[in-house]
Image (cartoon, helix red, strand yellow):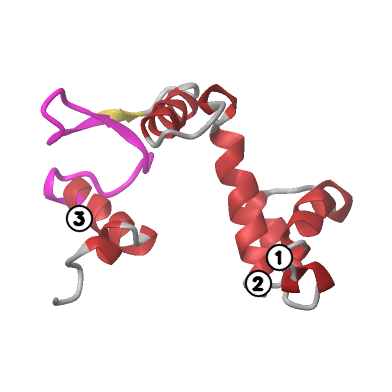
C-alpha cells in the first residue's frame, strides 16, 4: 500500500495531524486553536476551539468504545502522562520533555520519568514475562 494508506496510517498520529491540518486549511483556517469542534456531518470545522472539558469527554467516550475498563477515569491528563512517558522512554532529553509539557520543575516531572523507566530495557523486570 502507498504512504498514508492502510491500518498503520490510521494509527499514525503524525499522519492524522497532517490530515487534520490540511482539512483546516481547506476551510481557510490557518491559525488559532488546533482542536476544534466539527459540524454534525463531521466535515466542517468550527471557528472556535473546543471547550476545555470537551477533550476529557471525548477521551472518556473513546475509551468506553474501545472497551477499556474504568473508561470514566480517563481524561486529558491521560494524554499528557502518556506523552511524557513515551517521550522519555524513546530517549527524548528530559529538558525538552519538561519544556514541551510545561512542567515548572524537574521534580514535578519525576513521576512521569519513573513510569517511563519501568519499561526501559535496562530495568531487570523488562525480561520478565
Proximity of marks 3 and 2: CB atoms separated by less than 8 Å: no
Q: Nearer the viewer, mark 1 or mark 2?
A: 1
Which quadrant of the structure image shows residue 76?
A: top right
Residue drawn at (88%, 51%) of the image: 107
Residue beneath label 3, please? 22
Residue that sits furthest to the right in the current view: 107
SS at circle 2: loop
Residue drawn at (60%, 50%) of the image: 82
Q: How far, Cα to Cα, is label 1 from label 2?
A: 15 Å
Residue drawn at (67%, 75%) of the image: 91
SS at circle 1: loop
Magenta stretch, overall SS: loop
| Residue 29 part of the magenta-drawn span | yes
Residue drawn at (24%, 61%) of the image: 7
Q: Nearer the viewer, mark 3 or mark 2?
A: 2
SS at circle 3: helix
Compare residues 25 and 83 and report the one nearer the observer: 83
Q: Please state if 122 lies on the left or on the right of 86 as rendered.
A: right
Q: Please state if 128 lies on the left or on the right of 83 as rendered.
A: right
Magenta stretch: give its range: 25-46
Q: How far, Cα to Cα, is label 1 from label 3?
A: 35 Å
Residue that sits furthest to the front in the current view: 129
Asked if 106 appears above or below 2 in the picture, the reply is above
Compare residues 118 and 110 and report the one nearer the observer: 118
Residue beneath label 2, please? 92
Residue beneath label 1, please? 119
Image quarter (top left, top right, bottom left or bottom right) of the C terminus: bottom right
Compare residues 10 and 97 and report the one nearer the observer: 10
Please tell me which of labels 1 and 2 falls first in the chain.
2
Q: Could you say where residue 74 lies in the image, as x and y percent from the top left?
A: 56, 31
Amino acid at each position: 500500500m502507498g504512504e498514508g494508506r492502510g491500518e498503520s496510517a490510521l494509527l499514525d498520529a503524525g499522519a492524522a495531524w497532517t490530515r487534520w491540518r490540511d482539512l483546516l486549511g481547506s476551510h481557510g483556517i490557518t491559525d488559532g486553536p488546533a482542536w476544534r469542534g466539527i459540524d454534525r456531518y463531521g466535515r466542517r470545522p468550527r471557528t472556535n476551539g473546543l471547550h476545555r472539558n470537551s477533550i476529557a469527554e471525548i477521551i472518556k467516550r473513546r475509551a468506553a468504545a474501545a472497551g477499556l475498563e474504568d473508561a470514566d477515569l480517563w481524561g486529558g491528563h491521560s494524554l499528557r502522562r502518556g506523552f511524557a512517558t513515551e517521550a522519555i522512554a524513546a530517549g527524548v532529553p528530559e529538558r525538552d520533555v519538561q519544556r514541551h509539557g510545561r512542567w515548572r520543575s524537574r521534580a514535578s516531572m519525576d513521576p512521569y520519568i519513573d513510569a517511563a523507566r519501568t519499561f526501559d530495557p535496562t530495568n531487570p523486570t523488562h525480561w520478565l514475562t
